[in-house]
Image (cartoon, rainbow, N blue to C red):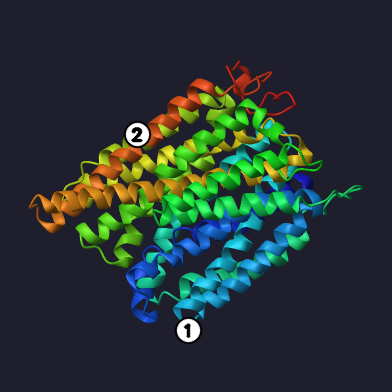
């Protein structure tokens, strides 16, 4: 029993650390107007409060995952938490726009280290399929629910205190996570042959990813083309180097590749939903920061319930594919409902149904997506695979956000040019983007349901057979 308790205590510490990281991808959205007013950001420069974080976070995930395999996942996790906490102090106390952007970039570095190894640590702690499914359900809530919680927390802190607290709140949490992690996380296994860091590969892939995010958020085709060239050079180098940063054989594993595609599409829909829903509530319905935060409470509650109480049971009973398809289909339905939200919409009829469906869909789907991605990977490469998983979500989120926001802007300008009133034109742009997001989520459901081939389980929950299962090398015990 002691071992079980210690594993779950370690899981809570890991998830709390990762929650800090996930929150910072959305917590600033509601506070941006206040930050702009206080620090004198221009409208174009304001985007760098978000982009500086995304660039360093997305660009350094693979390198962080590889360092976790070479140096030890616990060491990298602790280092990432320390970096992130110090950067949060710098952001919260930043006296100028330039220092805030630098602080956000350093936050991204720490966040990449934490996120890249947290999943690998969890998989190492939980080897029993039934326990692993429950643990991944909890972790899935943190990953998928962090966006909703971030909007809620950002609205509450900005509305009741000031924007500074959306960063300073990380400090006591970060200190607590670091102290607890030193005590409850298992020591890193002795690594007889640490290997070498593929420096050129790390530079190429980090530059390619950062350039792609920069090109996407700034709509710069030349930069995107440059990132493609760097990525091709990275693949060529990895095929020739003795100790590659990312062994290309990883992408010969069917479930790894398919789950990356699903993750990109899913994250594209999710990131855009949180961002655009907050804008719709603020700019169309006239909500203030606190109102927007409170509006996301239903999403957070339903997502928590489905992640913690429903997802693992569905996976153990039916396998990976059915709950994955069902969850993504619910998310698609949520976005489709939001695509018809009117200018004079009410919360009860035009917002709440979509909030509830999104919470249920995300809570159910995230667990099987993560399990599918990690199921075929050898333990010694778990850190790398975790970095690949997180990279696909981050890149998908950045790409989806850029594409759907650009689509919304184009539609708004087109409707305004046709003589439609400003508010109606703005809402028309949001509606088109929500519809496109629904298409992304639906495509993810179809691809995952069609192409994923999880490993069969010996016995499913309640003693019944299942078509597919928790991907694990050990047979699943009777968990009735």
Disc on the earlier residue, 2 or 1 = 1
Residue occupying image coordinates x 69% and y 52%: 202
**Quarter of the N terminus within the rendering:** top right
Q: Nearer the viewer, residue 347 or 211?
A: 211
- In this rendering, the answer to whether 63 lies above or below 43 is above
Which residue is label 2 attached to? 439
User: Does residue 317 appear to the left or right of 401 in the view shown?
Assistant: right
Q: Quick check: can you spot residue 390?
A: no
Residue 87, image x, y percentages: 59, 72
SS assignment at label 2? helix
Specify few, some or many for label 1: CA neighbours under 10 Å numbering under 14, 14-19, or 20 or more. few
Residue farthest along the bottom direction in this orientation: 95
Which residue is label 1 attached to? 95
- In this rendering, the answer to whether 332 lies above or below 71 is above
User: Does residue 397 appear to the left or right of 109 in the view shown?
Assistant: left
Residue occupying image coordinates x 12% and y 53%: 417
Residue farthest along the left direction in this orientation: 419
Disc 2 and disc 1 in contact, CB within 8 angstroms: no
- In this rendering, the answer to whether 358 lies above or below 412 is above
Residue 97, image x, y percentages: 45, 77
Residue 387, image x, y percentages: 64, 47
Specify few, some or many for label 2: CA neighbours under 10 Å numbering under 14, 14-19, or 20 or more. some
User: Does residue 87 appear to the left or right of 36 in the view shown?
Assistant: right
Residue occupying image coordinates x 49% and y 21%: 450
**What is the number of callouts on the image?**
2
Q: Quadrant of residue 316?
A: top right
SS assignment at label 1? loop
- In this rendering, the answer to whether 329 lies above or below 389 is above
Q: Nearer the viewer, residue 268 or 221?
A: 221
**Quarter of the C terminus within the rendering:** top right
Q: Quadrant of residue 359?
A: top left
**Alpha carbon separation for disc pair 2 and 1:** 42 Å
């Amino acid at each position: 029993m002691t071992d079980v308790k210690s594993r779950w205590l370690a899981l809570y510490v890991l998830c709390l650390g990762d929650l800090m990281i996930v929150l910072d991808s959305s917590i600033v959205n509601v506070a941006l107007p206040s930050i702009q007013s206080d620090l004198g950001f221009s409208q174009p420069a304001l985007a760098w409060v978000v982009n500086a974080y995304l660039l360093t976070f997305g660009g350094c995930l693979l390198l962080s995952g590889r360092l976790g395999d070479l140096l030890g996942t616990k060491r990298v996790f602790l280092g990432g938490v320390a970096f992130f906490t110090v950067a949060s102090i710098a952001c919260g106390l930043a006296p100028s726009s330039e220092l805030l952007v630098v602080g956000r970039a350093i936050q991204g570095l720490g966040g990449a280290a934490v996120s890249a190894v947290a999943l690998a640590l969890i998989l190492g702690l939980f080897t029993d399929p039934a326990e692993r499914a429950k643990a991944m359900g909890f972790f899935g809530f943190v990953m998928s629910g962090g966006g909703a919680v971030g909007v809620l927390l950002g609205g509450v802190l900005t509305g009741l205190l000031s924007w500074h607290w959306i960063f300073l709140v990380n400090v006591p949490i970060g200190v607590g996570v670091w102290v607890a992690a030193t005590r409850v996380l298992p020591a890193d296994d002795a690594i007889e042959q640490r290997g070498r860091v593929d420096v050129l590969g790390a530079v190429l892939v980090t530059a390619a990813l950062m350039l792609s995010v920069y090109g996407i958020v700034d709509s710069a085709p030349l930069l995107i083309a440059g990132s493609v060239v760097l990525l091709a050079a990275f693949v060529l180098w990895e095929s020739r180097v003795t100790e590659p940063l990312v062994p290309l054989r990883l992408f010969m594993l069917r479930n790894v590749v398919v789950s990356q595609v699903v993750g990109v599409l899913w994250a594209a829909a999710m990131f855009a939903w949180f961002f655009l829903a907050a804008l719709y509530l603020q700019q169309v319905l006239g909500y203030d920061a606190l109102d927007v935060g409170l509006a996301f409470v239903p999403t957070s509650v339903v997502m928590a319930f489905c992640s913690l109480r429903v997802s693992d049971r569905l996976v153990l009973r039916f396998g990976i594919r059915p709950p994955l398809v069902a969850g993504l289909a619910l998310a698609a339905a949520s976005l489709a409902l939001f695509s018809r939200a009117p200018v004079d919409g009410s919360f009860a009829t035009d917002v709440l149904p979509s909030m509830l469906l999104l919470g249920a869909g995300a809570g159910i789907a995230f667990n099987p997506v993560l399990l599918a991605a990690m199921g075929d990977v050898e333990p010694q490469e778990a850190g790398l695979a975790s970095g690949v998983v997180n990279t696909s979500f981050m890149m998908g989120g950045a790409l989806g956000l850029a594409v759907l926001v650009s689509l919304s802007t184009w539609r708004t300008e087109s409707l305004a040019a046709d003589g439609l009133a400003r508010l109606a034109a703005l809402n028309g742009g949001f509606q088109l983007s929500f519809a496109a997001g629904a298409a992304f989520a639906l495509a993810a459901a179809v691809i995952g349901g069609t192409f994923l081939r999880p490993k069969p389980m010996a016995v499913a929950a309640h003693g019944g057979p299942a078509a597919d299962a928790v991907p694990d090398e050990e047979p699943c015990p009777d968990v009735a």
